[in-house]
Image (tube, rainbow, N blue to C red):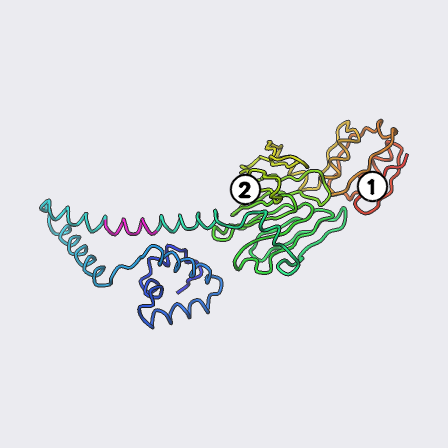
Amino acid sequence: MDYSSYQIEDFLTDDSFIAYCYAENAEAIKKWENIAAENPGIVQFINEARELCLLLGIKVGAAEKAAALDHLKLALEEVAVEEEQPESRIIAMRSYVMRWIAVAAAILIMAGAFTVYQLNTNPTGAALYSAANDHNYTLIGQTKAGERKFIHLPDGSTALLNGASSLKIATDYNNHNRHLLLTGEAFFSVTKNKHKPFVVITGKTATTALGTSFKVESYANAEVASVMLATGKVKVECTQPDLEVADVTLIPGQKATLFKGDKVFTQTSFDNNDLQNWLNRKLVFKDANLTEISAKIKTMYGITIAPADKAGDGISFTGEFSGKDINEVLEAIGFTNHFTYKQDGNTIKLLF
């Protein structure tokens, strides 16, 4: 039998699993120990279901269950052969049916509640960030300024890493958690797994999702950090406990921004075209001044244009770029505005 798709409620309605939880017979214990050994991916679920079983005291005797089922079968058979039944028989049959429906419903409800309990008692974003180090996180992707990298994660999720960024995953990623440590900017498409929340941790924010897609921006020395939600729902926390910033929940089309020094997230809507342009690396300028050009280049490439002298006040540019690197963009803008530039790491200085 394939147990890989078992959910908590499946375990709790399996007689042999209940017997295993209560160590009632050697055969059940051996069976589930073998299942755990052969299916390491469900060991966590087995442990969670066992914990819930003992917590709820789910233990219905085999004799009791067999007797109830026999009565139920008999009642159903009598329904089939009798056109009319005494009211007492109908009540008895309903009693058995409703009893077992109630038991099954209680198990399902409690299993769901247990999942919610787990999600709500996970470590805070601040705690996760403070505990992150080179021993429990491994680097899986890094980009230079202006470079992008597409990363496949072990659970099937993906990350599009923007320029001047790095991404680390927990050493036990997809075993007990799905925690990632991001510096810079990335777009994530998350495979659903309600038992293992997907958490992107940065020096400023922690974004938690079960299955969704969103973009996180949090460069080390930037004055601002943000999360843009494309699909699903996410919770965004501040990872700096001294700021005491309240968590926010986003729905598609919303953006949470944390400005340096603020003690609250700013929630706004965003144009989905802006996110699509970012994903497609498309820049659109219409009579853009240097401030707008600098902001879009920072968002697209993770590169900062250093404050320019007075000559920069007269810059204006109209045009589009798709999939171009930073050098092609700046050379085109510089040609029409009579400047050259010099790049030093993640910073560009304009020369007039």
Q: For this view, does 81 lie left or right of residue 221?
A: left
* View extreme (front): residue: 242
Pointer 1 residue = 348
Residue 273 is situated, as x and y percent measured from the top left of the image, at 64, 34
Label 1 amino acid?
Ile
Report the disc number at residue 98: none
Quadrant in which the C terminus is drawn: top right
Residue 155 highlighted magenta (yes or no): no
Looking at the picture, tell me which residue is in the foreground, 311 or 59. Answer: 59
Give the prevailing secondary structure in the magenta stretch: helix
Give the residue at x 66% y 57%. 140
SS type, badge 1: strand
Label 2 amino acid?
Lys
As drawn, 45 above or below 279: below
Q: For this view, does 82 lie left or right of residue 341?
A: left
Residue 251 is situated, as x and y percent measured from the top left of the image, at 53, 37
Report the disc number at residue 235: 2
Q: Which mark lies nearer to you, 2 or 1?
A: 2
Q: For this view, does 316 lie left or right of residue 211?
A: right
Residue 267 is situated, as x and y percent measured from the top left of the image, at 59, 33
Q: For this view, does 334 lie left or right of residue 172?
A: right
Q: Answer with mark 2 or mark 1, whichever residue precedes in sequence.
A: 2
Quadrant in which the N terminus is drawn: bottom left
Q: Please identify the quarter of the rendering in which residue 215 is found.
A: top right
Residue 271 is situated, as x and y percent measured from the top left of the image, at 62, 32
- What's the CA distance linking mark 2 and mark 1? 35 Å
As drawn, 112 above or below 255: below
Magenta-drawn segment? 99-107
* View extreme (right): residue: 352
Label 1 crowd (10 A; few <14 / some 14-19 / many >=20): some
Residue 104 highlighted magenta (yes or no): yes
